[in-house]
Image (cartoon, rainbow, N blue to C red):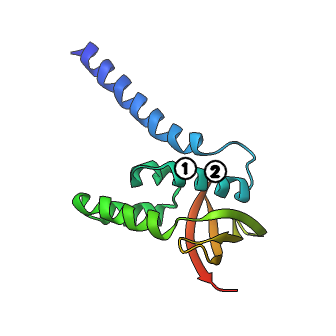
Amino acid sequence: MIMRRRIVGFVAAALVAGLVAVPARAQKPDQTASQFYLAYRAAFDKAKSIDELLPYMAKMRVDQVKATPADQRGKMFEMIKELGALTNVKIVKETKSGDGATLTVEALGPDKAKTTVTVDIVKESGAWKLGKESSSSGP
């Protein structure tokens, strides 16, 4: 009985350590908000499911994903990938604010038109996370 409790305790500790390590793998120490965003973009381009992007997302965004019924997450992910497809990504400005930063990004959108994206990057538990994104297309 005591041995079983120790094993259960060990397994639980290993799971918690694994969950804590996921965000740590998502970024390097002393990484800037811009470097984090570029790492996120690389992960975004390679991602095959929304779950692969959760370590990069702010809690509010993770909560939104988790609130989506599991059978609808695939379609949601397809839409996100389609609308978020950017090429020639260039960060033109990083403005620090409190524990976060706002990035101004220029890129080509899914329609190959020049797009400006405003990205809020926030700090949660000492790690950069992707907050709100908004974009506008035009000359």
Can see residue 124? no
Disc 1/disc 2 C-alpha distance (Å)? 6 Å
Instruction: Farthest residue to the front: give it.
Output: 112
Question: Which residue is disc 1 drawn over?
Answer: 43
Judged from the image, the secondary structure of the residue bearing numbered disc 1 is helix
Looking at the picture, tell me which residue is in the foreground, 59 or 104. Answer: 104
Please identify the quadrant where the C terminus is shown.
bottom right
Looking at the picture, tell me which residue is in the foreground, 22 or 85. Answer: 85
Q: Residue at x 37, y 23 (%)?
A: 10
Q: Are marks 1 and 2 in contact (CB under 8 Å)?
A: yes
Q: Amino acid at mark 1?
A: Ala
Q: Position of residue 53 (x, y in %)?
A: 48, 53
Judged from the image, the secondary structure of the residue bearing numbered disc 2 is helix
Q: Count neighbours of disc 1 (C-alpha within 10 A) and say few if under 14, some if 14 to 19, many if 20 or more.
A: some
Task: Tell me if residue 5 comes above or below residue 84 in the rendering.
Answer: above
Task: Tell me if residue 9 comes above or below residue 94 in the rendering.
Answer: above
Question: Which residue is disc 2 drawn over?
Answer: 39
Q: Residue at x 26, y 15 (%)?
A: 2
